[in-house]
Amino acid sequence: MSTGSEDGVLRSILPPGRVNSVFGFCGQHAWTLLFVGGVLGALPPVFGLEEGYYMTVLSEMFLFGILALSWDIVGGQTGYPSFGNMAFFGIGAYTTAILVKDVGTAFPVAMVGAGLVAVVFAAIIGAAVLRLRGHYFAIATLGVLLAAQQVSRNLEITGGASGKILLDVPPGTAFYYLFLGLLVAEMAVVYYLSNTRFGFVLNAIRDDEEKATSMGFNTTYYKTAAWMLAALFTGAAGGGYSLFNTFINPQTAYNGAWNVELIAMALIGGSGTVFGPVIGAFGLHTIIEIVETAFVGWQLVLLGAAVIVTVIGFPEGLVGTLREYAGEMEYYKRGGMAATSTDDTEVATDE
Amino acid sequence: MSKAVDAAATESAADAVLRTDGITKRFGGLTAVDDVDIEVHTGEIVGLIGPNGAGKSTLFNCITGTLSADEGQVYLQGQDVTEWPEYEIARAGLGRMFQETRVFGDMTVRKNLLLAGQEGGAGVGDLLRRPDDRLLGAAGELLEYVDLGELADVRAGRLSFGQQKLVEFAMELMGDPDLLLMDEPAGGINPSMLENLIEYIRRANRNEEATIFLIEHNMDFVMEIADRIYVLAHGERIAEGTPAEIRNNQRVLDAYLGRE
């Protein structure tokens, strides 16, 4: 924390109590807010937003929202930071590409197929990598991503290194609504789960997995389920993306840089929350888009700097930091500190 | 063995919440727990004491399934649970408090308790169930009971060590265990809080019918609270008896004073 006077200025501009009441409001009306957000998101095309640059940017924003929130189910809620989420994305992307182009399946069916193939893949891979923790897990998942990329480069059905071109695709508006709908659905699912046993156990695994096991929870089961849920949404999003982009190759499908981007989005927005990763995705994608247009190539430098500042300065992310700031007041008000000081100073000496 | 002795042994075994039969655990060349038999009966508060490195926590770990014993069996309510995974043993009614207090720091105090009170299987319906009024009520009551009602919505990690210990204790009560293993409950707690803790443990034992098996270094505390005490030294069980008997046992005194 900074010095007292600076703190005072911050407090007068943004009183913790007010922040807290905003959080309270959001908590009470989460379903309404989500509904309103979904409707607002659906309006632009109705009021004349046409296919083109801005619609593409907005569609991508929704897409990154899905990816960041999916990453956060395992990375933020469960505490297993994955560098391989884009593997689900790539598998989904290739699944629809193959189903639509080679098999002739209808697009919606192909997308559902993309999600399911990714889920099956997650179940198999999860059994192996979810035994690892921390850095080991992160590196193993990166290995999964690179391996998946290599496989697609060497198979004939995926079009090898040159990939697949998809020309007969639905209009851009369809993808706009597809990604928006998927994002709202995922937010609803994650929000609902956060107050169920499933959500509780995921958070418990993040905080202390051994303790969770000693309390009777089969943590492998819960971790794998979370991993599969993340794969479902990431795979479906990837399934939409290959047609949205009309082209898919190993680099775009299994994009390691995107994987870093979506982690940054979740961290900056506030991992372990429902709205944080989505806010992070919208904010960072907009900034990246602007920087990329104005100074080509510098967006990656910006991304690196943003991640460093976040991790050092406010590891809880935007939403997490604000929540902490708001909760602080509550804690002092209720005598938390007074109780703390008496307990800590009088530690028993009889050992 | 005569028939009468046999019958008596079966009878006491039936009433045992926990029974270990020749538990042995080796780490390389070191035998941390050596052929230890223990029996804890329904409704008892049993102490486990011994000098540092006696194998107390290792024995606990073998009972909970955290470590697998090299030899011997663990019976919980008469069932052989030796080979069971840790989470299934916990589900069968075994609660455990750790030596270093462990709560879920980023979750609120209330959420810690709601998690601890989860019952039933792991089917999809169970996973998707939200905490009902009964569970919320029970969590609220327990928090009032341990005097933490005001801090219910604060992140557990913000609480002091002593408060976290109470949260952990309340979590165990939410789980309603048949047997609660406590590893040094009195460690690092101030004297006034210790008195509260003794009262809490006694009431849990009486009202919730939780049988309690605890490791403790604080002799006054364990002598006051335990019905019976087991003593370990160098992995072996060297004595068993009431607090008065243990206090006057020459082998125990020798073990603690390092004469052997």
Image: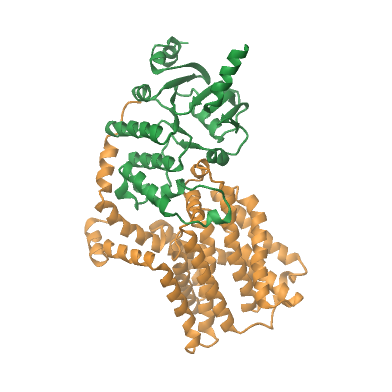
Chain colours: A orange, B green
Instruction: Spot the residue most to the bottom.
Output: A48
Residue A308 seen in the current view: yes
The image quarter containing residue A311 is: bottom left
The image quarter containing residue A255 is: bottom right
Apparent side of residue B140 relative to residue B60 in the rendered image (left or right): left
- Residue B128 or residue A17, whichever sits in front: B128
Q: Is residue B26 above or below residue B109?
A: above
- Which residue is at a point 32% across and 59% down the rendered structure image? A325
- Which residue is at a point 54% across and 41% down the rendered structure image? B91
- Residue A111 or residue A285, whichever sits in front: A111
- Which residue is at a point 72% across and 70% down the rendered structure image? A161
Residue A174 position, x and y percent, is 58, 81
Apparent side of residue B194 relative to residue A188 in the rendered image (left or right): left
Apparent side of residue B167 relative to residue A179 in the rendered image (left or right): left
- Residue A301 or residue B15, whichever sits in front: B15
Q: Is residue A81 above or below residue B88?
A: below
Instruction: Spot the residue most to the right.
Output: A156
- Which residue is at a point 44% across and 30% down the rendered structure image? B212
Q: Quadrant of the C terminus of chain A?
A: top left
Residue A1 seen in the current view: no
Residue A109 position, x and y percent, is 67, 74
Residue A50 position, x and y percent, is 53, 88
Residue A220 position, x and y percent, is 59, 48
Q: Quadrant of the N terminus of chain A?
A: bottom left
